[in-house]
Amino acid sequence: MASVLDLRRRIRSVKSTRQITKAMKMVSAARLRRAQARAMAARPYVQMITSVLLSLIRRIEIIDPETGNLRHPLFAMRPEKRVLLIVISGDRGFAGAFNANIFKAALQFIGGSGDKELDIEPVGNKAIDLVRRRYPRAFYNEQQVENPAEPPTTGKPITRRVRERKARIEGLGDHAGMLEKLNVPTVFDFARDVVSRYMHEEIDGCYLVYNEFKSVIQQRIVTERLLPLIDISKRDITASIEPTPEERAAAAEAATTAGVQLKEEDTREADEEAKKFGTAEVDYIYDEPAEQLFNVLLPQYVAAKMYHAMAESVAAEHAARMTAMDAATNNASDMIDSYTLQMNRLRQAAITKEIIEIVSGAAAV
């Protein structure tokens, strides 16, 4: 049985841990407010570019009457033989089941992929570590090919990277640090690369796995189809994992004690105004041809959706860490109370024993 001195040391150690978890909770709450504001600020752009595309689609034929093909290859649907899965996780731990739930959704998608060739592109340090441990990395060879810009006889050869697939499931490039310093140019470059791969038929579909964040108590893990574009007005969510009532209650308690807003900001009025642009019966005149408009706007739309998903995932990570640190702080307080009660009982037993010894000695005399 522990002595009074041992219990005092344990109490001192748990108090130090409680100070750390309480500080981490407040830091996560402060970062959550900034991340939540950034995610909210990204929504109007996504809504407006969606409205512009809807207005464009209503007034311009998507199918070219001369060739019978779609005016943009991002609308083309092909049998999914090669699929790209982008997994957006957190950069750090101490966030409860945040990363574990994302990995669970990703592994469910991988398990249901059948015999498809699957490329996994992780975003976030935790997803990068998981992909490195479980799956082989994609292998590229450098080959010398003729330069098409010069005559075959006089042109100098150029070096091109050629993919050699060695496994059905392989990991692609790492994006370490992207979520820590989330900025628009980096995400848009990533999105342009994904769009280019789809347009060149290197992949037949692209899916996102991330944590959708609306508020501290309203979030879920979703698997969303990014490409091909089927219906721009609706999100194509193929699977989702909802939080339990206990997790919602814990998040609400943590947010209340940290002074974080529980409910989602009311943006219905702004959303309705954005939708009016795409549904208004106005005869807009477009100087550019439909192909040129689609070539500019559709990659921007895909990039905006990817940026919005990453911004929401960052906010959800901070919310999960705030909740986990609040639970750790409460557990530390309960341990301190338990150890204090044990220490007081030992002290009282020692005092009682001394009194009995004194009384017994006096009676013997």
Image: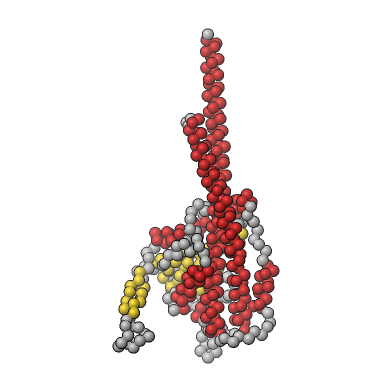
Q: Which residue lies furthest to the top in this view?
A: 365
What residue sits 30% from the left and 88% below the top? 153
Q: Position of residue 252 (x, y in %)?
A: 62, 53
Q: Where is residue 117 in the image (x, y as percent from the top left)?
A: 41, 70
What residue sits 54% from the left and 32% below the top? 342
Residue 240 in view of the camera: no
Residue 149 in view of the camera: yes
Write down the quadrant of residue 242 in the picture: bottom right
Write down the quadrant of residue 217 in the picture: bottom right
Q: Establish if 167 lies above or below 218.
A: below
Q: Where is residue 338 in the image (x, y as percent from the top left)?
A: 55, 36
Q: Residue furthest left?
A: 153
Front-most of residues 239 and 84: 84
Q: Residue furthest bottom?
A: 66
Q: Establish if 89 lies above or below 199.
A: above
Write down the quadrant of residue 139 in the picture: bottom left
What residue sits 48% from the left and 72% below the top? 189
Count the marks.
Answer: 0
Front-most of residues 102 and 94: 94
Which colour scheme appears in the figure? secondary structure
Q: Establish if 59 lies above or below 112.
A: below
Q: Where is residue 90 in the image (x, y as percent from the top left)?
A: 49, 59
What residue sits 61% from the left and 66% below the top? 41
User: Does residue 280 appear to the left or right of 118 in the view shown?
Assistant: right
